Image (cartoon, rainbow, N blue to C red):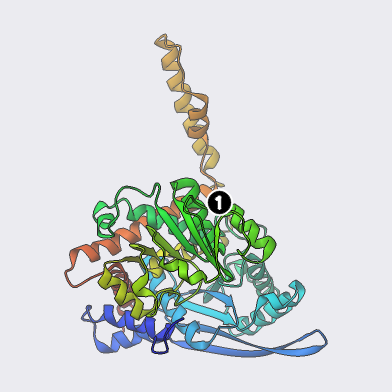
Amino acid sequence: MARSDEPSFRDSVNMMFNRAVALTGLPPGLVEKIRVCNATYTVRFGVRLRGDIHTFTGYRSVHSEHMEPVKGGIRYATSVNQNEVEALAALMTFKCALVETPFGGSKGGLCLDPREWEEHEMEQITRRFAYELAKRDLINPSQNVPAPDMGTGEREMAWIADQYMRMNTTDINGRACVTGKPLNAGGIAGRVEATGRGVQYALQEFFRHKDDVAAAGLDGKLDGKRVIVQGLGNVGYHAAKFLADEDSCKIIAIIERDGGICNYDGLDVDDVRDWIAAHGGVSGYPHGDYVSDGAALLEYECDIMIPAALEGVIHLSNAARVKAPLIIEAANGPITAGADEILRKKGTIIIPDMYANAGGVTVSYFEWVKNLSHIRFGRMQRRQEEARHQLLVDELNRVMDAAGLSEHLSESFTQRYLSGAGELELVRSGLDDTMRGAYQTMREVWRSRDDVEDLRVAAYLVSIGRVADSYRAKGL
């Protein structure tokens, strides 16, 4: 349990920002402009459900409009409050700047437990919340574009998009008012997996740099690395699955709300997810050792830890006992400012949240562009690419025949080479390129400046610099 002297999530974000901005030399006035949230709207609305009127409280915070629209998810949780939403909006500003998506930062939340309501009730609540935001242009393709977050997904985004379009029947770009929609409602292939896929790409890029791997006390490649995942929601599941299936990592522990399970031979991620869906938790899972205090697994030996659920799971009370040499923050703010300092002094390498979980907003950007262009990625060029590749294959086979060679290009190679890139391949390619480029930019600052101790400060410095440049370009 976190100690009473632990700073709040918002305080942690401010402390980390202050540690970085002190190294920039920016004027105090500009620093304050970048630090503060521009506006936060609080809405309280009633919905008639189960024969009575229930009042709900929601928020939409806009941190920075150095670029527009502003971008950020909407979460449904009983813990939602103004301070949390404003801290998350600030992280979105810096995240978008780091990965060069042309958005300012925003965040929203609704204080409720989605498990307490039936689907048709959730639709009524979501539509009313969307109405309250949209009529104030806090949902708008050119001003404020939400996305899924904790407790929300494709279903809620489809309801929000439909509600906006009902209110704006002549807005031809209406579907771009929100991202993370289902494919049949204007979504994009690869969005559901995007944040988890981004975590995988971030680790792959980290392991391309031998000096960085050595700094974490590790060696070699991702292959065989022991991984602990905290939270098997959308992000944790996809990150764990891709790392296990494609990079041969060994998922040795999974932590959920009812405890955790451990198996040093490796857990089957799909099997664990199916068990959770059927039983509501990991308790009783037959292929691993159950630990009722799931947080204790955060202190087990491993190579990589992926906190992928809530804020503040690594804090002053447990940071000193965390043994993972490399932590990648798939969730927002899973390490408090105090814990961050303890881990840094121990030599732990932390790949920060504003970079590590930026896959979601990156692919949201692709979806927004797709909605504005009104055409699926790959539709114009895929078959033309295949035709050009076919010309080369035919010519190579002709040359081989002319040379009297009996061997031709193999069927498997020919099929792979001829296949033009569809939307999913293009989305993954764009995400991989984004994660590589952002890491290299962040790493260059980390490695080239003696006063930059870690990747988090490096990430903030890159982001703050880009936000400051945008404000200067506006005349501030």
Give left or right: position of 350 versus 360. left
Q: Position of residue 377 (x, y in %)?
A: 54, 51
Question: Foreground residue, 451 or 68?
Answer: 451
225, above or below 297, in the image: above
Q: Position of residue 362 (x, y in %)?
A: 46, 62
Question: Foreground residue, 464 or 319?
Answer: 319
Q: Badge 1 is on which residue?
A: 268
Give left or right: position of 265 versus 217. right
| Image quadrant assignment for residue 383 | top right
319, above or below 194, in the image: below
445, above or below 337, in the image: above
Mark 1: few/some/many CA within 10 Å (<14, 14-19, 20+) = some
73, above or below 226, in the image: below
Question: Foreground residue, 174 or 172?
Answer: 174
**Residue furthest top as drawn:** 404
Q: What amino acid type is highlighted by mark number 1?
A: Asp
Q: Position of residue 129 (x, y in %)?
A: 65, 82
